Amino acid sequence: EVQLVQSGAEVKKPGESLKISCKVSGYSFTTYWIDWVRQMPGKGLEWMGIIYPGDSDTRYSPSFRGQVTISADKSITTSYLQWSSLKASDTAVYYCARRTTFYGHNDYWGQGTLVTVSS
Amino acid sequence: EIVLTQSPGTLSLSPGERATLSCRASQSVSSSYLAWYQQKPGQAPRLLIYGASSRPTGIPDRFSGSGSGTDFTLTITRLEPEDFAVYYCQQYGTSPQTFGQGTKVEIK
């Protein structure tokens, strides 16, 4: 069974760093792309970026390039999304999702990680 | 990037009625690489349709997708109580992939 299990909710202060995770099981981690998607409170879905764990090829949406870092650790079949300095506007739910191919849809999604940034 | 515009923003219908949701792209979507997702409060999106008209295993046949080029439609033939949710279209044929802003289907 394909599963993407994300780390738990986080409450952080502005300026703090954070790394959230997406643990994958049930398929070959290195042969599918993983997307990260943001959903701000009460809003729609925004694509942030993608990684191919096989060779760590990573692409970012222009809106998020330089704001976040996406990575993957093949040894533990986990992808990460990290911030070096959080802002209140980073408050959102973040989803990881498996992409069937580079030009493919998202067939499996993680349950989401709520990140709250507040002073 | 390709902008997807969904209409209407909210659809108020009763169980058993037919729902027709629209997704219009700012430029042609390559090879009909368009998907539809359903999202309920507090849940992750769920894939309903890919390739504009293909249903994954386990998705009821009351959900159907159609369209090509710049105009796409999701139809729910007879709304069940569990179908009241927000629906998003996504194009994945041109990078960056983009989502529509969503259509909320609410109980009338």
Image (cartoon, rainbow, N blue to C red):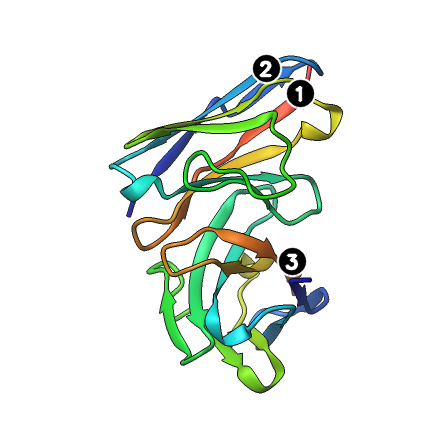
Mark-to-mark CA distance, 3 and 1: 27 Å
Q: Which chain carries label 1?
A: B
- Residue at image point 52% right, 28% down: B64
Contact (CB < 8 A) between labels 1 and 2?
yes
Q: Mark 2 lies on which chain?
A: B
Q: Which mark is residue B98?
A: none
Question: Looking at numbered disc 2 in the image, what kind of residue is underneath it?
Answer: Arg
Mark-to-mark CA distance, 1 and 2: 6 Å
Residue B65's x, y, as percent? 47, 29
Q: Nearer the viewer, residue A82 or B54?
A: B54
Q: Which chain carries label 3?
A: A
Q: Which of A2 and A114 is in front in this view?
A: A2
Mark-to-mark CA distance, 3 and 2: 31 Å
The quadrant where residue A102 appears? bottom left
Quadrant of the frame with the N terminus of chain A: bottom right
Question: Looking at numbered disc 1 in the image, what kind of residue is underneath it?
Answer: Leu
Q: Which mark is residue A112?
A: 3
- Residue at image point 58% right, 59% down: A94
Residue located beneath label 2 in the image: B18
Residue located beneath label 1 in the image: B79
- How crowded pointer 2 is (Cα within 10 Å; few <14, some 14-19, many 20+) is rated as some
Q: Nearer the viewer, residue A11 or B88?
A: B88
